[in-house]
Amino acid sequence: MGKRLISLDNIVILVTGAAGFIGASLIVRLLRETTGSRIAGIDNLNDYYDPALKRARLDWIEHTAESSDSTWEFVEGSIADVDALRGLFSELRPSVVVNLAAQAGVRYSIDHPDAYIETNIVGFYNILEACRRYPVEHLVYASSSSVYGGNEKVPFSTDDKTDSPVSLYAATKKSDELLAHAYGSLFGIPATGLRFFTVYGPYGRPDMFVYSACEKILAGETIQLFGEGLCKRDFTYIDDIVEGVVRVMRGAPIGGEGSSTVPHAVYNIGGGCPELVIDMVSTLQDELVRAGALSTSYDAEAHRQLVGMQPGDVPLTFADTEALERDYDFAPQVSLREGIRRFVEWYVTYHVGERCDDGDLSGEG
Ligand SMILES: NC(=O)c1ccc[n+]([C@@H]2O[C@H](COP(=O)([O-])OP(=O)(O)OC[C@H]3O[C@@H](n4cnc5c(N)ncnc54)[C@H](O)[C@@H]3O)[C@@H](O)[C@H]2O)c1
């Protein structure tokens, strides 16, 4: 499918989920690299995980904005609030919208289904309607590797069937792809969905395994390894994700002939190299020792427990990233070892500061 090139300088860009892990990292990159743009973010700062981390990310953005050639503004609000969202679009008239706001997480959806419908379905529908009323050059939105469900064919290709989700989260993300396709077909909204694969790195998400495993290791707790430790994940470092998102933002799909008349595309964006979760944990432990956060005498084996699969979990994720490489000349660059090292460096700095504030310096290492 052809692409229409978009310069990210001197335009208005709206990022939803701006205080989230990927949103904040993306905005920092945009502030560093664009000129003359008005960059706006919206986030409802909900407490799915500690909002203090979301505030810390906003501080990071503010700090970056001070020396940026573009401007930054933040709105606290929900994409599920149709009036607020329309008001924002009417005022900003964004050229490029990146929708990252979502209720994320697979396990949380079992007890909190409403949050998924509200943000991932109603909120995304509101984004599409706003893009219809206030036309945009490109809507980029987050989908997820979870749409592949229990796919056994590897690597996962966007040509594979994705109509058997095994979690509500996955079902909402697949629904977003369908809604975006329908809006592209009906109203010509150029949109690209990105299926992210297990993103990790500085300012990461505490509900995700790399972060929670780090917390547990440092607290001297036992780490549960689901799927008897044999699950594999296509871990993707945050800078690689941001690089991929920026490249995609710059190239909006153009409808063509026949079945590709709809200006809508979906890509995988992953590391393309799945690792056993148990190996990731070993790398994490090594790097914590290297950073001086964990004692060299730490007994890794004694702190691991092999357990079965959890509802909604999948044994393997593995991205086929050929299409992204072909269309956007993008390939991930950061190895798991290097990415974990950078995450640990950030984690230690961030949490040591936090512990000092609390006067609590307990914990291993
Ligand atoms: N991190 C990953 O590994 C991963 C993997 C697959 C897909 N994704 C998707 O990528 C996107 C970004 O993920 P993330 O890791 O940054 O998650 P995140 O939870 O850190 O960020 C999402 C942000 O959206 C905000 N938000 C939630 N509901 C909102 C609403 N109704 N209105 C406004 N803001 C709202 C949250 O407060 C949060 O700050 C999400 O759509 C997620 O589903 C992430």
Image: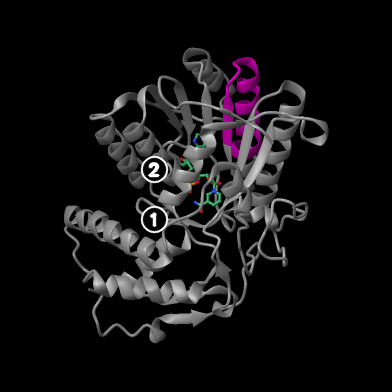
Q: Which residues are magenta?
A: 118-140
In the image, is residue 271 part of the stretch drawn in magenta?
no
Residue closest to the far right:
258
Residue closest to the far top:
91
Residue 83, visible in the rendered structure: yes
Residue at 28%, 56% in the rendered image? 346
Q: Position of residue 156 (x, y in %)?
A: 67, 59
Separation of disc 1 and disc 2 at Cα?
10 Å
- Foreground pick, 97 / 80: 97
Assign the magenta stretch its main secondary structure: helix
Q: Which residue is mark 2?
A: 25
- Tell me whether circle 1 and circle 2 mark residues in contact (CB < 8 Å): yes
Q: Position of residue 195 (x, y in %)?
A: 60, 48
Secondary structure, mark 1, is loop
Residue at 71%, 64% in the rendered image? 150
Secondary structure, mark 2, is helix
- Foreground pick, 200 / 102: 200
Q: Which residue is mark 1?
A: 201
Residue 219, visible in the rendered structure: no
Q: Position of residue 131 (x, y in %)?
A: 61, 22
Asked if residue 15 lies left or right of residue 346, the reply is: right
Q: Is mark 2 within 8 Å of ligand 1?
A: no
Q: Position of residue 342 (x, y in %)?
A: 32, 59
